[in-house]
Image (spheres, grey):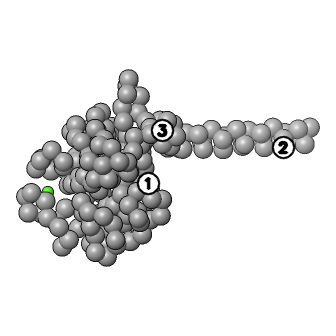
Amino acid sequence: MRYDMQWTFLVFLIVLMLSCISCDEPLQPSSFGTSKLSIVINEFLASNTQTNIDEAGEYDDWIELYNTSDSSVLLQNIYLTDSLNYPNRWRMPDTTIAPRGYLLVWTDNQPQGKLHATFRLDKEGEQIGIFVQQDGEFSVIDSLTFRQQRSDTSYGRFPDGESQWSFFPAPTPGAGNR
Ligand SMILES: [Ca+2]
Ligand SMILES: [Ca+2]
């Protein structure tokens, strides 16, 4: 009898643990499906104090997107976010990126132009995701989770568009990573 009760308790614990895991688990990008649009997050600067200024003359954080293909890519229904649980944080304006071209988006949460997202990046680390919405469904195009960043040192792919990431003490907003 006592043995049975121990088993019952154990099963109860396991069920409880499993249900807690599923409650707390954030939605992963895979929950949204993937899109084959040839755009990647190529570089970002989460703490800009003296690197480059936006239209308002401010040192603000940014994300550089890169078109990895030899054809122009029209961005339509594209969303950028700093939380993969919430793909729809900021809808990008419809924009074309030239073949092997770059697009710089300011993440300053300031209404200072079309390419100013409604969120900022956290230097202590967070996420970046780019999504496309089709028929009400979000599909991830590219995403990453980053750790703590240093001021004025960007983090990006090297070479452009490839899977290897490096820190860049001399960031290259809108130009090839080097
Ligand atoms: Ca600004
Ligand atoms: Ca760059």
Give yes or no for contact between labels 3 and 1 (Cβ–Cβ under 8 Å): no
Quadrant of the rendered structure where residue 140 is? Answer: top left
Outermost residue, bottom direction? 169
Task: Please identify, in this view, whether the residue under mark 2 or under mark 1 is nearer the observer.
Answer: 1
The residue lying toward the viewer, choosing from 70 and 145, is 70
- Amino acid type at image mark 3: Thr
State how far apart marks 3 and 1 are (Cα).
14 Å
Mark with earlier residue (2, 1):
2
Q: Tell me the residue at 10%/50% (across/down).
A: 112
- Amino acid type at image mark 1: Leu
Residue 167 at x, y = what percent? 38, 71
Q: Tell me the residue at 32%/53% (across/down).
A: 100
The answer to whether residue 165 is left or right of residue 71 is right
Residue 51 vertical placement versus 44 (above, below) = below
Instruction: Please state, as top left, top right, bottom left or bottom right, where the C terminus lies in the image.
Output: bottom left
Q: Which residue is mark 2?
A: 6
State how far apart marks 2 and 1 are (Cα).
43 Å
The residue lying toward the viewer, choosing from 72 and 14, is 72
Residue 71 at x, y = what percent? 33, 44
